[in-house]
Amino acid sequence: MLSASELDEVVLREVASVDAVDVHTHLLPPTHGQLLLYGVDELLTYHYLVAELFMVLPLDSDDDAVSDALTPPTADEFFAWPKPRQAALVFEELFVRRTPLSEACRGVVTTLHLLGLGAQLERAVARGVARERRLDELREWFAAVDKEEYLELVFTKAKLKYAVMTNVPFAPEEATHFLQESPPPISPRLKTALRVDPLLAGDWPAVSAALAAASPPFAPTLDGCYRYVCAWVDRIQPLYLMASTPSGFRYEKSSPAAAPPSPAAPPSAAALLEQVLLRVAVERKLPLAIKVGAVRGMNAALRTGGDGVEVADLRFLRNLCLAYPQVKLLVTVLSTENQHELCVLARKFGNLHVYGCWWFCNNPSIIERTTRMRLEMLGTAFTAQHSDARVLDQLLYKWRHSRAAIGPVLSSQYAKLLEAGWPLTEADIKRDVALLFGGAFEAFMAK
Ligand code: RAT
Ligand code: ZN
C-alpha cells in the first residue's frame, strides 16, 4: 500500500515511462517518401507556427515594425517560397526577435533538446548569424539521419508502442503509395486509419471526383461510393474510419417513410452518411472516429493554419449513439466548452469513447483541466491524449509536454482517494496509467 508521500513519485514515474499508444497522428511511413515529414524546416513550418508568424508580421511593408531586410510576404507569397526560406522567417520572427513562449514554439525547443541539439539551437539564435545561415547546422544533422532508424529512435525516445496514421484516399499523392501493385510493408510502429471527411460533410463534388479518378472508375452513385470505400478498407485494413464534422453539423436518423430522392439528384449528406459511412462501419465492424468543432478555412489564406474553432451542438452524437448502438464512436472535441457535455455523453453510451486533447486544446493548462474533469467523470475509461503530430520529431515534445501535464493531475486525484481511505498500490497505478495511455482505447476497440 502506498503512503501519501510516495504517491507523487510513483505516479509521475509511471506517467513518464509508460509505453503509450498514439491514437491519431498525421505521420506517414518512410516508404511514403517525402510524405514522412521530419527535421527543423518541417518543425518550424508546422501550421500552428505559421499561424503565429502571421499574427506578428507587419500588415504591410510601410509598417514601422518591418525589419530592414524584411518585406512581409502575403500568405500566398509565403507558401510559394521553398520550405527552408519559410522556416527561416518563422525562426527569425518567433525565436530570434521574440521569446518562443507559446506551446508550439516551446515544442520546437523541447524537441531539439531531446535530440541533443541544444547547442546547435543556441548557436542558431546567437547574435551576428545571418538569417539565411541560422538553421544550417541543424539542417545538416537532420540531413544525415536514416529515415527508418530515425523513426525507431523517435518512437523509442517518445515511449510509444505505435501511432495511428491518417490515410486519406482522396489525396492522390498519398493514395498512390497504397495503389502500387505490391506496396512495401508498413512499419509496425504505424497503423492505418481511413480518413473520409467528404463523406461526413456530404461533399458530393469531392466524392464523385474521387470515384471518377479511380482506376477503374466507380459509378457516380451511392452504391459506387460504398464500393469505393469498401475497396479502400480492403486495401489498407484500417483500425477505424475517421472524419471531422463540418461547421454546424447536425444529424437525425432519416425516417424510413421519407420520399426517395429523384435519381438525378446528387446524393444527400444524410444518404452519404447512412448509406455509405455508417453502412461500412456496421458491415465491417469498424469504429468511427469523429472530430468535432473545427471551422475549416476561417481565414483560408493561411491554409490549415487558418482553420478555427466553434462550440458545436453535440446533439448529433446522442442521435448517432442511439440510432447505431453497434457502431463504436471515438470522439474528441476542439472547443473547451464542449468537453463537459462530451464526458456526460460518454457516461450515457458505452459505444462512445473520448480521446485526447486536440489541437487548440493541446495546451498544458487545458490538458490539466480537461484531464481532471475526465478523471472525475469517467475514471480510467478514456484516452488521455493523442499527439496529432504531423512531423515525426513532434512526437518527442507532444508526448513529453502531455505527460508532464497529466501526471500531477492524476496524482492529485489519487491523493484524494487515499485520503478517502482507499488502499492504493503501485500495481493499481501501473494498471491505471496503462489504461489512460492506450489500454482503454484498445479495450474499447476490442469490445
Ligand atoms: O491539428 C491539426 O493538425 C489539424 O490541422 C487537423 O489536421 C486535425 O488534427 C484533423 O485531423 O483534422
Ligand atoms: Zn489530426
Image (cartoon, rainbow, N blue to C red):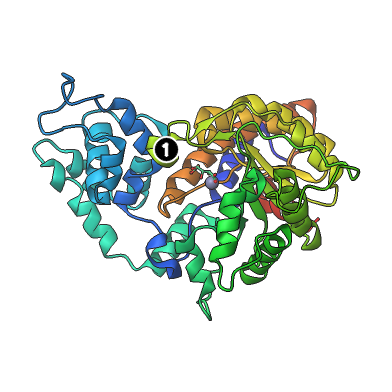
Judged from this view, the residue extending furthest toward the bottom is 182
Identify the image quadrant of residue 313. top right
* Residue 374 point in image, percent of width and height: 69, 33
Ligand 1 is within 8 Å of the C-beta of the residue at disc 1: no
**For the point 62% across and 71% down, which residue is it?**
235
In the rendered image of this protein, does residue 133 appear above or below residue 178?
A: above
Residue that mark 1 sits on: 305
SS at mark 1 in the image: helix
Identify the image quadrant of residue 122. top left
**For the point 38% across and 36% down, which residue is it?**
301
Q: What's under tag 1, amino acid-wise?
A: Gly
For the residue pair 386 and 206, the one nearer the viewer reads as: 206
In the rendered image of this protein, does residue 77 appear above or below residue 311?
A: below
Residue 191 appears in the figure = no
Q: In which quarter of the image is the C terminus?
A: bottom right
In the rendered image of this protein, does residue 236 appear above or below residue 302?
A: below
Residue 313 appears in the figure = yes
* Residue 276 point in image, percent of width and height: 73, 55
Would residue 434 be found to the left or right of residue 162 on screen? right
Q: In which quarter of the image is the N terminus?
A: top right
Judged from this view, the residue extending furthest toward the right is 257
* Residue 124 point in image, percent of width and height: 19, 43
In the rendered image of this protein, does residue 182 appear above or below residue 318?
A: below
Q: Dot 1: within a 10 Å radius of its alpha carbon, few (fewer than 14), some, or many (20 or more) residues?
A: many
* Residue 135 point in image, percent of width and height: 21, 48
Would residue 256 be found to the left or right of residue 58 on screen? right
Tag count in the figure? 1
**For the point 61% across and 58% down, which residue is it?**
193
